[in-house]
Image (cartoon, grey):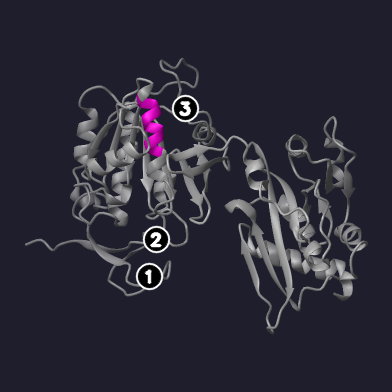
Amino acid sequence: MAKRSSRFVCQTCGAVTSKWVGRCESCGEWNSIQEERLDSGVGAGPQTSRKSRGRVVQLVGLSGESKEAPRIVSGVGELDRVTGGGFVKGSAILVGGDPGIGKSTLLTQASAVLANQDHRVVYISGEEAVDQVRLRAERLGLRQAPVALASETSVEDIIATLEDGERPALVIVDSIQTLWTEMADSPPGTVTQVRASAQALVRYAKKSGATVVIVGHVTKDGQIAGPRVVEHMVDAVLYFEGDGAHQYRILRAVKNRFGPTDEIGVFEMSDKGLREVKNPSAMFLQERATTTPGSAVFAGVEGTRPILVEIQALVAPSPLGTPRRAVIGWDGARLSMLLAVLEARCGVRFGQHDVYLNVAGGLRIQETGADLAVAAALISSLSGVALPIDSVYFGEISLSGAVRPVAQAASRLKEAQKLGFTQAIIPNANRKDNVKGFAPLKGIEELTELVASIASSGQNLVNA
């Protein structure tokens, strides 16, 4: 009898070992190693498969006419913005997010809009029964939409169903962690099954020309669960972000082969589902505290969209030997660097103070252009001086304390002008980007200039 061939695979990072161990040496996770067979399916050795010469694939040139329109407009404006103008035919899209954030709600609404436009839409649910999906559609007022539903977890059965009859324009699979294929001998949700199932769905999308949207679970670190190779196989990766305490949701593109990355779409969760937010800047500033120290308005850019958001800072004396540093919506390492620059280059002391920083509205900012707004909020809170209510801030701060220019300054200023702001404190090199009708800009070269202008009407920050 032939010896059974197997290997041991980490279900968190996909690392392979020759024997079982309690802790993965690659990612450090405990009890994540599982045994998987090698004699069939994905990962099978070359000795287990029949050798063939292969077929000759036809080669074509770059020039040529497309027989069909390249995109399908979903009708959900914010979703179309994030995808780059609609769903590209034959593409595979991976959507991730925390449980209950609204992934299924958004995709149900998009599928209903497309189905009402006479597109064939198939919704495959591996987590819910058909009746549960119908209950959600009834709550959203979409019960009459001609969406084809099915509850199935076998990849072979799903693809056979899709190939039977008219080719669908959009296929939604919720979720990839519940699927299993006969090509892999392991339980659903394991690295091998997720990789093999995703590979089969991507292959179907490329072969048939249908758009396949795959829903993926996320880990405790906020990353899509499963091997990273799944994100490389698909054409676009979208993250649905938000906080249960806020009604706003952010759809962010972190990968897009057919559009800009770092684009965002803003939605508001209501009892009737997700509603698009046409003016996110006004939404993020609607509850702004205009007379409280520690509040600064940052004019940022997410993808191609300029957005104004409130940066809130609280600097308070600390009774502890090691003061607290808490950040929500921004990079904690960036805050530590900025505090060090303020102390070393400007003489502003934070060593005996707790520092809390928050980006209002649940938005997460990733660009370095927020440095100047964060510094202004910190100095305002420490000095007890409220910043002018009609001013916006943007600029990058270097380790030397210099204020460096940022891109797309004109679009930031136009968005600020549209919302009634008349002043802007920006890098001196961006003053040439002023827009018509905006007040003369205040450009600064060094961070010490910002500290001096705020401290002139407050206390002595050097000795604070």
The secondary structure type at the circle numbered 3 is loop
Where residue 175 appears, as percent x and y from the top left, is 32, 47
Horizontal side of 46 relative to 329 (left or right) equals left
Where residue 218 appears, as percent x and y from the top left, is 41, 55
Where residue 291 appears, as percent x and y from the top left, is 78, 56
Frontmost of labels 1 and 3 is 3
Where is residue 340, by image quadrant? Answer: bottom right
Horizontal side of 23 relative to 311 (left or right) equals left
Magenta residues, as a range?
A: 107-115
| Residue 110 in sight from this viewpoint | yes
Q: Where is mark 2, residue-wise?
A: 13
Which comes sooner in the sequence, label 1 or label 3? 1
> Chief secondary structure of the magenta span?
helix
Viewer-side residue, 390 vs 22: 390
Q: Where is mark 1, residue-wise?
A: 24
Horizontal side of 279 relative to 390 (left or right) equals left
Residue 100 versus residue 31 in the image, above or below = above
Q: Are marks 3 and 2 in contact (CB under 8 Å)?
A: no
Q: Are marks 1 and 2 in contact (CB under 8 Å)?
A: yes
Which comes sooner in the sequence, label 3 or label 2? 2
Which quadrant of the figure contains the N terminus?
bottom left
How far apart are the alpha carbons under marks 1 and 2? 9 Å
How far apart are the alpha carbons under marks 3 and 2? 37 Å
Viewer-side residue, 310 vs 263: 310
Q: Amino acid at mark 3?
A: Gly
